């Protein structure tokens, strides 16, 4: 294979030769599909949906232009990417990362560089929308090959229709098959080597109808490390292709479109009232009767048409449409010339089927139907009044954010390694503890958290008289307030610090009925070295020894 364009980062140490498997490594989509040759692949169009990924992406983009689908997509994108005048839509969270403050500072700095290269503060909505519709997104990480330590210089967006991800099996020279069994020992199995790369095709289209024709696999081969590749995570297991979240809505959109078109045709054809003219032709022969009918029709018929382009009104008597009146001849002996009226269509206001397919479309996109056309409004009441659909939608958006964050993972990894901040081995450990916090604007989640907090505080207040009697303080903090070990230690430290600073009173100091601290010296008592008041001796005659335990009176036996 020809040399790849771009750069490569050496991964972690390869597995031991004894660590083997007959299953080839999966790609990041979780798909076990790989190609032995070719580029675009060849699919059989059984379902009539798509033949190649090229056709699939094209269909997704056409679907996004549908008004109802666009409204649902905007709901998802607006929920996932919250634009604020002061805050950035996404921030990196390194609280769980076990690293020095210097490393964390460098990671935050490089992440800010990545955000600036993407211009994410301004283009976040557009980037996320493209990723959601296409089901994948590509960025070319441009670096100075002579000075790679300067890091990424530019992040250039690549149209998904011009880029393909290829996993190809390497073949050894002179061998027909790459996989063969050397002996009866399974460990002597020779396993395939999979090479991964991207092919960039500037044309982005198929020159002929044959997808296997010469020229379809032509393009610039680019190394895998030089491209940031993030997909939706949905895979067609039968065809091995990546899908978008819009894929489930293909049938719903087509059904809605057909129902709307049929409704328009029905209303146009059935709505107007039409008249039937029965013209008495007497004993005229057939030819003359038809001529007489045409003369009468042209005489009484009006065909005034308004031309919106010129603003003129013209007479088009020579054209007759199906929506116009009917002219029928009637022979002698009939009731003479008569005019009757046909009623227009009934039940034209019924749009139940339209509403059904709209809701079906919204459900196929995991958007609550209550958001359709502002239906139901927005309730800021108790969380018990929040629909379950909204909670499911919030979880769905959270999954999308988690998947979309992989794009930042790949960019940040490349940037940190190129600048020698970390090694590839370090990244394998660090990546698990790096999180990305998206800006939230979901009032439902806030209401839910607030109400849960109030309920816990009320239960803790109810259980307070029983602390020390039936329950320990630690039990209340863990089981009722749901505090973790880290939160308990953190809160204890903060409470001690606030007591020392005088922000909150010391609970060990007695207070009066007004809540004011009582000075032991003011009460006429003495205090010990620690400042605690010395208690009066027991008046009942009980003698305490030096250890503080009661002592029996001397001189008597029991």
Image (spheres, grey):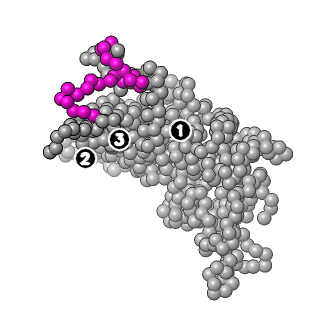
Q: What stretch is highlighted in magenta?
A: 522-544
At x 83% / y 43%, what residue is drawn? Answer: 147
User: Distance of mark 1 from mark 2, alpha carbons?
Assistant: 85 Å
> Is 322 part of what is drawn in magenta?
no
Q: Residue 546's image quarter?
A: top left
Name the image quarter holding the C terminus: top left
> Is 535 part of what is drawn in magenta?
yes
Q: Nearer the viewer, mark 1 or mark 3?
A: 3
- Which element carries disc 2, helix, strand or loop? strand
At x 52% / y 37%, what residue is drawn? Answer: 438
- Which element carries disc 1, helix, strand or loop? strand
- Which element carries disc 3, helix, strand or loop? helix
Label for residue 474? 3
Q: Residue 385's image quarter?
A: top left
Label for residue 331? 2
Report whether 113 appears left or right of 365.
right
Q: Nearer the viewer, mark 1 or mark 2?
A: 1
């Amino acid at each position: 294979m020809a040399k790849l364009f771009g750069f490569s980062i050496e991964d972690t140490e390869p597995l031991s030769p004894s660590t083997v498997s007959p299953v080839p490594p999966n790609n990041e989509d979780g798909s076990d599909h790989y190609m032995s040759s070719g580029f675009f692949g060849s699919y059989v169009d059984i379902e009539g949906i798509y033949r190649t990924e090229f056709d699939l992406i094209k269909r997704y983009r056409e679907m996004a232009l549908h008004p109802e689908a666009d409204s649902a997509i905007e709901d998802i994108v607006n929920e996932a990417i919250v634009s604020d005048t002061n805050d950035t839509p996404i921030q990196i969270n390194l609280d769980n990362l076990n690293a020095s403050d210097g490393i964390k500072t460098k990671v935050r700095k490089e992440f800010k560089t990545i955000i600036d290269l993407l211009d994410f503060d301004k283009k976040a909505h557009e980037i996320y929308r493209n990723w959601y519709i296409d089901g994948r997104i590509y960025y070319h990480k441009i670096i100075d090959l002579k000075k790679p330590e300067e890091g990424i210089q530019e992040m250039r967006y690549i149209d998904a229709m011009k880029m393909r991800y290829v996993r190809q099996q390497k073949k050894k020279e002179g061998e027909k098959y790459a996989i063969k069994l050397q002996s009866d020992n399974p460990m002597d199995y020779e396993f395939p080597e999979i090479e991964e790369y991207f092919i960039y095709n500037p044309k982005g289209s198929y020159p002929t109808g044959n997808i296997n024709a010469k020229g379809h696999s032509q393009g610039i081969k680019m190394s895998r490390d030089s491209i940031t590749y993030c997909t939706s995570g949905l895979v067609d297991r039968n065809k091995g292709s990546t899908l978008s979240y819009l894929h489930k809505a293909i049938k719903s959109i087509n059904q809605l479109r057909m129902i709307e078109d049929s409704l328009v045709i029905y209303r146009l054809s059935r709505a107007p009232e039409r008249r039937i003219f029965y013209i008495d032709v007497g004993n005229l022969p057939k030819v003359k009767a038809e001529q007489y009918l045409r003369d009468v029709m042209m005489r009484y018929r009006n065909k005034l048409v308004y031309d919106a382009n010129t603003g003129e009104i013209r007479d088009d008597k020579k054209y007759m449409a199906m929506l116009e009146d009917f002219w029928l001849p009637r022979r002698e002996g009939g009731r003479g010339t008569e005019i009757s009226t046909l009623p227009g269509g009934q039940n034209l206001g019924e749009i139940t089927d339209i509403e059904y397919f709209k809701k079906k479309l919204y459900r196929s996109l995991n958007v609550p139907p209550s958001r359709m056309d502002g239906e139901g409004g927005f309730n800021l009441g108790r969380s018990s009044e929040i629909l379950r659909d909204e909670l499911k939608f919030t979880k769905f958006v959270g999954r999308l954010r988690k998947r979309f964050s992989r794009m930042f993972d790949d960019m940040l990894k490349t940037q940190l390694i190129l600048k020698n901040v970390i090694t590839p081995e370090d990244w394998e450990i660090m990546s698990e503890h790096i999180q990305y916090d998206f800006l939230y604007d979901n009032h439902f989640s806030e209401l839910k958290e607030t109400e849960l907090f109030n309920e816990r505080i009320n239960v803790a207040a109810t259980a307070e008289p029983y602390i020390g009697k039936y329950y320990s303080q630690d039990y209340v903090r863990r089981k009722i307030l749901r505090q973790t070990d880290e939160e308990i230690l953190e809160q204890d430290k903060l409470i001690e610090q606030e007591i020392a600073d005088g922000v909150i009173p010391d609970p060990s100091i007695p207070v009066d009925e007004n809540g004011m601290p009582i000075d032991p010296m003011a009460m006429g008592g003495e205090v010990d070295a620690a400042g605690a008041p010395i208690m009066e001796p027991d008046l009942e005659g009980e003698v305490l020894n030096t250890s503080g335990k009661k002592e029996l009176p001397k001189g008597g036996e029991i």
